[in-house]
Image: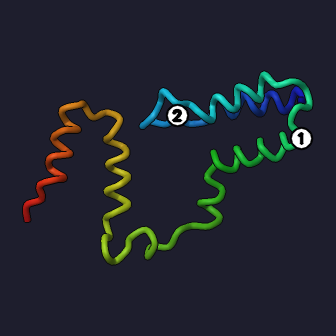
């Protein structure tokens, strides 16, 4: 492993976002740490791995292949993905009691 590759892995480790839903399980960060501790030349595709990780961090694929409005707002449930995003943003900060209330509200839907 070259010094440049080690620097790339270290940079990726600092830039990779933590999972807000499961912060106690930093799977990708653990993988990067193992790569940093690996013996020299233990992995043949290091440059490809580093490049792929940078592409993911920079959202290169989402920019290259943007989703159409029809996909993000299906006719059957136009707010589905915005509701899902809001739910994922709220979930880590929700207390146990808030979770129970949310679950009960989901069971009882009055119209």
Is the Cβ of the residue at disc 2 closer than 8 Å to that at disc 1?
no
Residue drawn at 23 percent across, 31 percent down = 96
Residue 44, disc: 1
Tell me which label, 2 or 1, sits earlier in the chain.
2
Vertical relation: 48 (above or below) 98: below
Residue behind mark 2: 18
Q: Work out whether residue 71 or residue 45 is closer to the camera in this orientation and state it.
A: 45
Residue drawn at 36 percent across, 43 percent down = 89
- Pick out the residue farthest to the left: 110
Q: Work out whether residue 12 or residue 30 is closer to the camera in this orientation and state it.
A: 30
Q: Position of residue 76 (x, y in %)?
A: 31, 75
46 relative position to 110: left or right: right
Q: Position of residue 82 (x, y in %)?
A: 35, 58
Q: Position of residue 53 (x, y in %)?
A: 70, 44
93 relative position to 48: left or right: left
Among the 4 quarters of the image, the one containing residue 22: top left
Q: Work out whether residue 31 or residue 9 is closer to the camera in this orientation and state it.
A: 31
């Amino acid at each position: 492993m070259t010094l440049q590759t080690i620097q790339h892995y270290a940079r990726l480790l600092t830039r990779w976002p933590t999972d807000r839903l499961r912060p106690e399980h930093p799977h990708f960060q653990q993988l990067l740490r193992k790569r940093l501790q690996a013996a020299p030349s233990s992995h043949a595709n290091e440059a490809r791995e580093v490049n792929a990780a940078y592409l993911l961090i920079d959202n290169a694929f989402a920019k290259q292949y943007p989703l159409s409005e029809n996909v993000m707002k299906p006719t059957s449930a136009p707010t589905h993905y915005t509701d899902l995003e809001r739910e994922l943003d709220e979930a880590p900060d929700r207390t146990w009691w808030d979770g129970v209330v949310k679950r009960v509200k989901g069971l009882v839907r009055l119209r």
